[in-house]
Amino acid sequence: MLKRNFTFMKRIENRLAIRLFFALLFFVSTVEAQYKPDIELKELFKDVQLGRVFNDSKTFADCTPRFAVDSILSSYHLEKLKSGFDLKTFVEANFILPVKPQPSIDKKEFPTIDDHINDLWKQLERPASNSKGSLIGLPYSYIVPGGRFGEVYYWDSYFTILGLKQAGRNDLIKNMIDNFTYLIHQYGFIPNGNRSYYLSRSQPPYFSMMVELLAESEGDTIYTHYLPALLVEYNFWMKGSDRLNSQKNAIDRVVRLSDTEILNRYWDNSATPRPESYKEDVETATGKKNPELVFRNIRAACESGWDFSARWFKDGLTLESIHTTDIIPVDLNCLLYMLEKNIAKAYNLMNNANESGVYNQRAARRKAAILKYCWNEKMGFFLDYDFLERKNTAIESLATVYPLYFKIATTEQAEKVAQKIAQHFLFPGGLITTLKLTTQQWDAPNGWAPLQWMTYKALRNYSFDSSADTIRKRWMHTVETQYKSSGKLLEKYNVLYPEIPGGGGEYPSQDGFGWTNGVYLQMKSEK
């Protein structure tokens, strides 16, 4: 491996290549077999999670063993038979618990929101480190979302980077992109987050957009430098496409719709309860004929980042009806369209017209398929496509703006989408995520920073500037209103009643918060 990396350095001699080389060297010298708590702890893991030793299932998944796992298990088998055995006491004696984030200090007055965000970057920054427990070490410092999320998250990071750019933190932007490059070269993809229990899935593929953002300040050579990583990520999403046929129309993340049409879906390589939500998943699948299918679909929804939403529910209401893997999501395929376009651009910069043409052709085919399968003329909206039912799903969501963001939509389509967003999705606090009122956090009444930004830019792309500016102003006002009352920047917001914090989902709303900070600063800079 080291010999191969020296060859790579000789071929591409620049400072970015040197950073990548030392990242790979970091891996060789520091990373051992990654600890996977649900597999290695066996019945102890199940007993702790099902016994609700911790209110948040993620807590035990993030614990670090104090001793060798075999020793802990041997001790557990003996100790649990003794009178007065207490499982929580045993766990605390044998594991290092994750550090809980300190709650914001109650004050009558808070710093300005800009000063608070600048201070938050310091609180949310994590140094380069070796692997520890389930945490996968990274060679460069990075920003975490905050709250219970003490590791880097894939798609969160793009929106965090928007704010880092406004804050003049190009050093951290480069670090985060190089950390993702490191993960791509080690695992063949970017995991959901840098935890061992996330190594079976990714998240929405924003990496090429991060590269595009960096190129704005560093120049187009950035595309060619990161081309190897872009190709590895693309191959991850397209794995199995060469084996699709009329008898086998779906493999992993690829779905064949015709001889020339292949689109993508969200997936997970595992079909077991999520370690970080073990008890919740077991309860959801209880009584189901095929619990593994339920687990797979739950995990696939986590790969989407929208965990959870009526988007993925067969009945549009309940988690138990989840069928994520039957769905071709419009947002995912737009992101992969952009990945294909950026790969084509990198090859063009290298004067490789043949490969550039190949990826431009793939992007053109994907664009045509998105317009064919995800545009619903009757609804005047872009919708996800159920490839088993061979029809659009009935759930209208802000995923509809992705074809506008990437300029795939026609002018007429964009106008219809813009009208519907203004009529049905825009509320006093900003944009709701779907029109469904459920108990899930990615449904009404919640609004999320990344979707406010994607919609704002999507509408600007088609000159709906007034509508876009209304969204920007309402969202910023919501963030500012909540900050004035609580001193916090939140993960999500209630846009129907902005004075009330967002809620729903598997855990309480978190304070921090990376992508809220990023989108707020970016929107504030917009003219």
Image: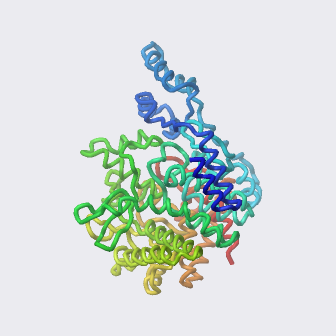
Instruction: Give the left or right position of residue 469, taking residue 383 as reference.
Output: right
- On the image, the x and y values in percent for residue 507 come to 50, 47
- On the image, the x and y values in percent for residue 178 come to 63, 56
- On the image, the x and y values in percent for residue 473 come to 63, 72
The quarter of the rendered structure image containing the C terminus is: bottom right
Q: Residue at x 59, y 37 (%)?
A: 132
Instruction: Give the left or right position of residue 475, taking residue 251 as reference.
Output: right
Between 358 and 128, the residue placed more toward the observer is 358
User: Can you see residue 255?
Assistant: yes
Farthest-out residue, bottom:
412
Rendered image quadrant of residue 255: bottom left
Instruction: Give the left or right position of residue 197, taking residue 167 as reference.
Output: left
Count of marks overlaid on the render: 0
- On the image, the x and y values in percent for residue 424 come to 45, 74
Farthest-out residue, top:
83
Q: Which residue is drawn at 43% across and 83% down?
A: 413
User: Can you see residue 513?
Assistant: no
Q: Which residue is drawn at 68% across and 55% down?
A: 18
Between 440 and 392, the residue placed more toward the observer is 392
Between 331 and 420, the residue placed more toward the observer is 331
Rendered image quadrant of residue 134: top right
Relative vertical location of residue 309 with respect to residue 107 in this rendering, above or below: below
Q: Which residue is drawn at 75% across and 64% down?
A: 168
Relative vertical location of residue 377 with respect to residue 269 in this rendering, above or below: below
Farthest-out residue, left:
247
Relative vertical location of residue 88 with respect to residue 421 in this rendering, above or below: above
Instruction: Give the left or right position of residue 280, taking residue 211 as reference.
Output: left
Q: Which colour scheme is used?
A: rainbow
